[in-house]
């Protein structure tokens, strides 16, 4: 059983940088995608991006220019930075573990099997 | 706005069967496997179905998934009060090069 826990400021001012850390209970980061997903109040889920254990990253095109995801394996953590935030970035931010599922053709697709409890970040002055 | 479309709500009485649709396109559902997530109010989403129709350990077999072309569906048979939650489909989108979630469906047990 893998446990993930988000931490970071719950209030960020407009135009500043949102910074969150996800602490992971396992010491094994290999073969997984370490991901961030958010949910605006009363709305649906939005994938932000992930970092593979090799360090390669992928981001949602709508957020790519503002997002950084980093891995800190020695601390069993990974982090999210989202710069130039606006009120539209107010959301519950979840960290999650992703893993590839291979279909009948051997083509991989990610799924997210363990999630943190989420942390609400409000953007307001 | 999401590229995967779900009905905003679905409902049924205890014991009934409820089905939730998820409509996409050739670049997402048509090309990749579909996963489903269940979310109770105030809690994180939980993986409910993966690989179109496979259930993680602990998910009852009265919950099933299917996929045909560019659409997928989740069915809950023998509806119970504990099934009242929000349900999201999801898939990788090859055109967007992004993981996309559906708009979500709130299931209510009447």
Image (cartoon, coloured by chain):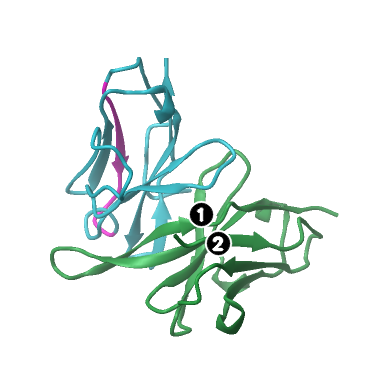
Q: How far apart are marks 2 and 1 (CA)?
A: 18 Å
Question: Relative to residue A90, is residue B16 drawn left or right?
Answer: left
The residue at which mark 1 appears reads as A46
The residue at which mark 2 appears reads as A4
Considering depth in this image, is B62 or B22 the residue closer to the camera? Answer: B62
Sort mark 2 into few (<14), some (14-19) or many (20+) by Cα contacts within 10 Å: many
Instruction: Give the magenta range.
Output: B17-27
What percent of the width, then of the height, locates residue A120?
68, 51
Which residue appears at 45% of the width and 77% of the height?
A28
Considering depth in this image, is A110 or B77 the residue closer to the camera? Answer: B77
Residue B76 visible in the picture: yes
State which chain disc 1 sits on.
A
Which residue appears at 50% of the width and 76% of the height?
A27
Which residue appears at 23% of the width and 37% of the height?
B61
State which chain disc 2 sits on.
A
Q: The cyan chain is which one?
A: B
What percent of the width, then of the height, locates residue A55?
48, 84
The quadrant holding residue A106 is: bottom left
* The stretch drawn in magenta includes residue B19: yes
CB contact under 8 Å: marks 2 and 1: no
Q: Identify the residue at the far right of this view.
A: A125
Question: Relative to residue B5, is residue A48 drawn left or right?
Answer: right
Q: Is mark 2 on a helix, strand or loop?
A: strand
Residue A68 visible in the picture: no
* Chain A tint as drawn: green
Considering depth in this image, is A80 or A65 the residue closer to the camera? Answer: A80
- Vertical position of residue B100 compared to residue A23: above or below: above
> On the rendered image, what quadrant is the C terminus of chain B found in?
top left
Same chain under badges 2 and 1? The reply is yes
């Amino acid at each position: 059983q893998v446990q993930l826990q988000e931490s970071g400021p719950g209030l960020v001012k407009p135009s500043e940088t949102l910074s969150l850390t996800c602490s992971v209970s396992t010491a094994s980061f290999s073969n997984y995608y370490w991901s961030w997903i958010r949910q605006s109040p009363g709305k649906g889920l939005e994938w932000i991006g992930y970092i593979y254990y090799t360090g390669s990253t992928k981001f949602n095109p709508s957020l790519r220019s503002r997002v950084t995801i980093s891995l800190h394996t020695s601390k069993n953590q990974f982090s999210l930075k989202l710069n130039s935030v606006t009120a539209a970035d107010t959301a519950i931010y979840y960290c999650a573990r992703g893993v590839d599922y291979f279909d009948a053709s051997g083509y991989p697709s990610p799924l997210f099997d363990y999630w943190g409890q989420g942390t609400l970040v409000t953007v307001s002055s | 706005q999401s590229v995967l479309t779900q009905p905003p709500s679905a409902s049924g009485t205890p014991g009934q069967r409820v089905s939730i649709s998820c409509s996409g396109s050739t670049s997402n559902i048509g090309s990749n496997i579909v996963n489903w997530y269940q979310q109770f109010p105030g809690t994180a989403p939980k993986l409910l179905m993966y690989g179109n129709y496979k259930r993680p350990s602990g998910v009852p077999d009265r919950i099933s998934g299917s996929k045909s072309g560019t659409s997928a569906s989740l069915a809950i048979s023998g509806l119970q009060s504990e099934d009242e939650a929000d349900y999201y489909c999801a898939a990788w989108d090859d055109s967007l090069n992004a993981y996309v979630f559906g708009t979500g469906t709130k299931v209510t047990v009447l």
